[in-house]
Structures are given as C-alpha cells and as structure tokens.
Amino acid sequence: MEIATPSVIALTAVITAAAIWLIILAARLTRNPRNRPGISVDLVDQARELKALGQIQEAVFLVRGETGMSQRAAARFVNRL
C-alpha cells in the first residue's frame, strides 16, 4: 500500500471543494430560476390597486400566483409598490 503524497492530497481537496461548490450552485439555481416570466404591467397595476385598497395579503397572493415568487419576495415586491 502506497502512502499518499501531499500533491495527491491537495488534488483530492481541490476536486472535493469544486464538487461541493457545484452542488451549492445547482441548489441556488434551482431555488431561483432565471427563466421566470417577467412581471407584466397589468400585474403591477392590479397589485398596486389592491395595496391602495388595503388588501396587501391579496396583492401578495396575486403576485405569488402569477410569478411563482416566494412569500417573502412577493411581500417585498408589494411593499415597494
């Protein structure tokens, strides 16, 4: 049985780190897909109208349903209107 040399250990560490980085990147891209449909002007107008009427939760629900945003992201979006 051979004893591992420092270069083999270093190479193994680099490959392991790269694999972990790729897994993390894949998880982030899955959570936040880039090919989401854009937010239409009509949706913004509807959400703004609901917010003006005091129906903030309904506006958040509408934005989530149309865009697939998370609860948190949709709430931030509506609050910024």
Image: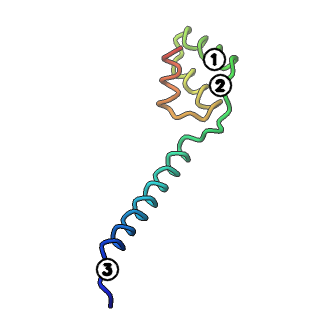
Q: CA distance from mark 3 to mark 1?
A: 61 Å
Badge number at residue 4: 3
Dot 2 lies on which element?
A: loop
**Do the CB atoms of the residues marked 2 and 3 lie less than 8 Å apart?**
no
**Residue positioned 40% across, 59% down in the render:** 17
**Which residue is under mark 2?**
39
Q: Position of residue 19 (x, y in %)?
A: 46, 61
Q: Quadrant of residue 41?
A: top right
Q: Position of residue 35 (x, y in %)?
A: 65, 38
**Do the CB atoms of the residues marked 2 and 1 lie less than 8 Å apart?**
yes
Task: Relative to 48, say whether 74 is above or below.
Answer: below
Dot 1 lies on which element?
A: helix
Residue toward you, 51 or 16: 16
**Do the CB atoms of the residues marked 3 and 1 lie less than 8 Å apart?**
no
Q: Position of residue 70 (x, y in %)?
A: 52, 35
Task: Relative to 52, say whether 29 is above or below.
Answer: below
Task: Look at the image and tell me in which quarter the N terminus lies.
Answer: bottom left
Amino acid type, callout 2: Ile
Badge number at residue 44: 1
38 sits to left or right of 20: right
Q: CA distance from mark 2 to mark 1?
A: 7 Å
**Residue positioned 54% across, 24% down in the render:** 60
